[in-house]
């Protein structure tokens, strides 16, 4: 992914390059573009514009052009925080923003497939987070399995944002009931869909025992 400028307007854009060895007969770029177009009304995703062909060392390379979004990767954002982690209350607001965004994708019978802290851009934070997601993944696996992977990844990111395993023991019960010890079977039993996770967060009664 590269930041580029339109020559005629000077407008900043983002260009995702698909090199030939990973884009045989342009299939990967075509699938990615169609998926972004299908999800174009999902607020958590970056708006796709068009496909271009550039030449690099005499080799044609497909580039998908999208909006350029200001912000900082979640992984870098965490590194700048005291203790390199979010307090549980703020981390829960981040999880809620992610769950709402992923819910929009799942309701269109699609999935992200590659959720982690290097694929999340934080544009604004506080009691509400403004975030965008990078790098959708396309898999031949069943969509339901990929959607479940998204849910488990959201819980994993939540756990990571609060310092991970090192600080887990001291987290409040409210948080632990969401993390489920990061056991996939327990997470799936509690949150069969991302909508259930979002609803759980909306009805959460916070326990101030920490």
Image (cartoon, helix red, strand yellow):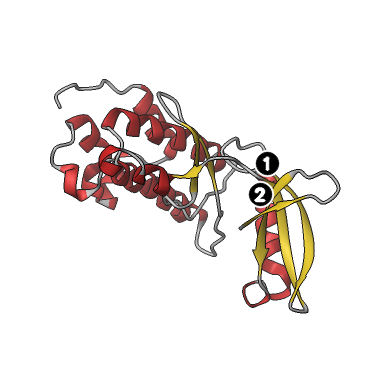
Residue 10 picture location, percent across and down? 78, 45
Tell me if 84 is positioned left or right of 122 in this view.
left
Q: Residue at x 46, y 49 (%)?
A: 147
Q: Choose top left, top right, bottom left or bottom right for residue 86.
A: top left
Q: Report whether residue 188 is seen.
A: no
Q: On the image, numbered disc 2 is attached to which residue?
A: 36
Tell me if 110 is positioned left or right of 207 in this view.
right
Tell me if 16 is positioned left or right of 130 in this view.
right
- Which structural element holds mark 2? helix
Q: Residue at x 40, y 49 (%)?
A: 75
Q: Are marks 1 and 2 in contact (CB under 8 Å)?
A: yes
Q: Choose top left, top right, bottom left or bottom right for residue 31.
A: bottom right
Q: Report whether residue 110 is seen.
A: yes
**From the viewer's perspective, is residue 130 above or below residue 58?**
above
Q: For the residue carrying disc 1, how many other residues have a C-alpha within 10 Å: few (<14), some (14-19), or many (20+)?
A: some
Q: In the drawing, what numbered circle is on residue 40?
A: 1
């Amino acid at each position: 992914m590269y930041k580029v400028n339109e020559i005629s307007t000077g407008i900043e854009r983002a260009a995702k390059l698909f090199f030939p060895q990973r884009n045989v007969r342009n299939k990967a770029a075509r699938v990615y573009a169609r998926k972004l177009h299908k999800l174009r009304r999902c607020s958590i995703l970056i708006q796709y514009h068009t496909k271009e062909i550039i030449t690099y060392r005499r080799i044609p390379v497909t580039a998908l052009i999208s909006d350029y979004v200001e912000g900082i990767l979640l992984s870098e954002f965490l590194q700048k925080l005291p203790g390199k982690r979010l307090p549980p209350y703020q981390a829960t607001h981040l999880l809620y923003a992610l769950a709402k965004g992923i819910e929009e994708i799942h309701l269109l019978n699609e999935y992200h497939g590659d959720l982690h802290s290097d694929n999340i851009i934080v544009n604004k934070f506080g009691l509400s987070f403004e975030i965008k997601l990078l790098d959708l993944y396309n898999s031949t696996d069943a969509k339901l399995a990929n959607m479940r992977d998204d849910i488990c990844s959201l819980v994993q990111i939540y756990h990571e944002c609060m310092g991970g395993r090192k600080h887990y023991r001291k987290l409040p019960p409210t948080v632990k009931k969401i993390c489920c010890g990061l056991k996939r079977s327990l997470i799936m039993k509690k949150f069969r869909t991302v909508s259930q996770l979002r609803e759980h967060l909306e009805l959460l009664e916070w326990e101030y025992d920490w």
